[in-house]
Image (cartoon, coloured by chain):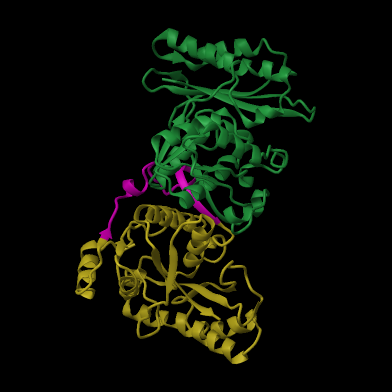
Chain colours: A green, B yellow
Amino acid sequence: MGALHEGHCSLVKQSIMENDHTVVSIFVNPSQFAPHEDLQSYPKTLLKDMELLAARFPNKPVDAVFVPTVSEMYPSGITLDVGNQRGAFVLVLGCSEQLEGVTRPQFFRGVATVVSKLLNIVTPDKIYFGQKDAQQCVVIKNMVKDLLIDTEVRVLPTTREESGLAMSSRNQYLSPESKQHSAAIYRGLNAGEIFYYSQNGPTKSTDILDKVRSIYNQEEKSRFELEYLSLNHPETLDKLDIVTPGEGAIMSTAVKVPRADGSGQARLIDNVVLK
Amino acid sequence: MGALHEGHCSLVKQSIMENDHTVVSIFVNPSQFAPHEDLQSYPKTLLKDMELLAARFPNKPVDAVFVPTVSEMYPSGITLDVGNQRGAFVLVLGCSEQLEGVTRPQFFRGVATVVSKLLNIVTPDKIYFGQKDAQQCVVIKNMVKDLLIDTEVRVLPTTREESGLAMSSRNQYLSPESKQHSAAIYRGLNAGEIFYYSQNGPTKSTDILDKVRSIYNQEEKSRFELEYLSLNHPETLDKLDIVTPGEGAIMSTAVKVPRADGSGQARLIDNVVLK
């Protein structure tokens, strides 16, 4: 979706290493936004994005930056009013409804739809996503498997700022102070992760999540509002009562923090994968 | 879906003429059947189908017959209980809900899903459908357009028996007598068609449909039960009050007739395209 940062660059770098040709798609996809969400204010910085790509990859640059228009991607048109949408959409049932899907019920329908279109246009051997969007990765992996799409889904580790805060285009919404508080998101997940590995065996989810919450509870509620914190199966996203080494889990969270411009809250997500 | 007849063969013949290679897919797709429908009894005649293809195309045979298993086509499994389905599905909103969609609300979701999988596996330059399944053709054309799938959808005319009855695998369910009565389906549509062209200008849908109904009303209701009869826009399937030359319409119908084995009714569909 553009507003490129080092997280995106890590995907581009890996693709350049692993493939003969690399295409970067930049498209702020309307169908994954609800009418009340930040489609209008979502950062659009195409020229800066192009400069960043040129500066970061001077020797073996990307082969193309694909920047389609909305009407090219949605030939039947697209409205954010889901009840009035027409045209083809891709649903991935079973892993789209929980976690992010609770507050964003149409989000993964929009994501799966636009990714299926990008795959049909570019027909890549490999497609790259960041682990930061953990549920998106599961949805896309299931879509590719179920629709028998001939591509390999590569998921690369979350890129973090020095504070541990996961890189995100939405971090632009934060003041330096808010960024500092947001670093608690990963500090908490990390505390849960350390606890899990210290147990060295099947561990109750509530015990792991309590460790995370003990960090989150140190933050003032007005500056750090927890939306969800959950442990789910890494492939089905079914909720787990117990995490078992070997099967593993995704521990994920969404937190709301104040926006720098005073216009409400920014919503940040993060996760760690337990093995 | 197999149970091949001359309608299917006309598609195969055209594909052999127009392409270097032809693949025939035979797959009775569970996700387009509702739990109360005829998935179990749907005719499965693979060996006969293979013999028919070999006999009809001795000089330039088809290159492959693709006969996947259900688990190959549905890697996440498939249940007919829609509320419990998991995995990726393709919706085509706006043209799936009317006509066939009224009594078969999940039908076109199943059709679009399986066709998108077949397209991803085979990646054909062209894909062939019969006009008999008019709404299916519209749904698939819209899916290909909206998901930017690189294939050409070819729609070929309905193949008919001498009586005018559209060829269908479900005609196997009919007694010779029932087949005779079913011939009224096309006789009616044809009467409407002749009336429309005789008007040589914009014509009220009710006037056209009255001509069709006057034929259908000659049949005994116990032997010929009209489910719907409708005039719709050829691309959007929006209902039309007036049919205008140049824009045109699809005039379509579904009729239920007694099955030869006494086990309820067979459901037959047919249509004509008005230009």
Instruction: Answer above or below: position of B82 versus B230.
Output: above
Q: Which residues are magenta?
A: B65-92
| Position of residue A47 measured from the top left corner of the image (x, y, whole percent) | 65, 41
Q: Does the magenta run of residues contain B79?
A: yes
Residue at left offset 67%, top offset 40%:
A44
Instruction: Answer above or below: position of B247 versus A60.
Output: below
| Position of residue B117 measured from the top left corner of the image (x, y, whole percent) | 40, 52
Quadrant for the N terminus of chain B in the image: bottom left
Residue furthest front as drawn? A59
On the question of residue A252 being in view, the answer is: no
Quadrant for the C terminus of chain B in the image: bottom right
Residue at left offset 54%, top offset 83%:
B212
Q: Nearer the viewer, residue B118 or B63?
A: B63
| Position of residue A164 measured from the top left corner of the image (x, y, whole percent) | 58, 17
Q: Nearer the viewer, residue B49 or A257?
A: A257
| Position of residue B248 measured from the top left corner of the image (x, y, whole percent) | 59, 78
Residue furthest top as drawn? A198
Q: Nearer the viewer, residue A170 or B189?
A: A170
Residue at left offset 36%, top offset 65%:
B263
Left-right relation of A6 to B164: right
Instruction: Answer above or below: position of A234 versus B23.
Output: above
Q: Nearer the viewer, residue B132 or B122?
A: B122
Left-right relation of B163 to B246: left
Residue B231 in which image quadrant? bottom right
On the question of residue A101 being in view, the answer is: yes
